[in-house]
Image (cartoon, rainbow, N blue to C red):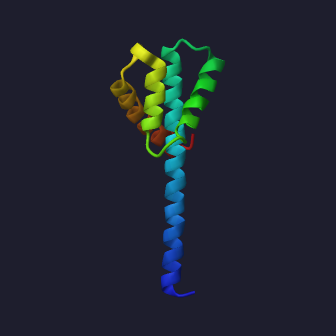
Amino acid sequence: MTAFDQRLKAFEHTYAHDAEKQYRIDVRANKLLGLWAAGLLDKTPLEARNYAKDVVRSDFAEPGDADVIRKVAGDLGRRATAEEVRLMRTACIEAAKAQIAAGN
């Protein structure tokens, strides 16, 4: 294996690792966002877990977070604006990063 091949393989490994980490952060952030929204919707603990799973699944509809924001803001109605949901998702991303970095 040449030095170029080794560097390419190392780059591919790093890229795959970073992509997996970002995926885990996005899933965790969406789950946290769903749990936050479930609290505003007065859901029971079981309903909250199921709602959080629905929020996570909604992120697979299209690239980016617009699908998640649209779902949660639509479900919350007047309880929170789309901008409030977007700000909360940003906070959830930071919380997810910290949780994953801590190994949780």
Residue lying furthest bottom in this view? 2
Residue lying furthest left in this view? 83
Q: Quadrant of the C terminus?
A: top right
Residue appearing at x 54%, y 11% in the figure:
42
Tell which of 101 and 51 is nearer to you.
51
**Residue 88 shown left or right of residue 103 in the figure:** left
Q: Position of residue 32 (x, y in %)?
A: 51, 30
Q: Position of residue 10 (x, y in %)?
A: 51, 72
Res. 77 image quadrant: top left
Residue appearing at x 35%, y 30% in the figure:
87
Q: Position of residue 69 (x, y in %)?
A: 43, 31
Tell which of 74 and 2 is nearer to you.
74
Residue appearing at x 39%, y 33% in the figure:
91
**Residue 91 shown left or right of residue 57 in the figure:** left
Number of marks in the rendered image: 0
Residue appearing at x 56%, y 44% in the figure:
103
Q: Quadrant of the N terminus?
A: bottom right
Vertical relation: 71 (above or below) 79: below
Residue lying furthest top in this view? 42
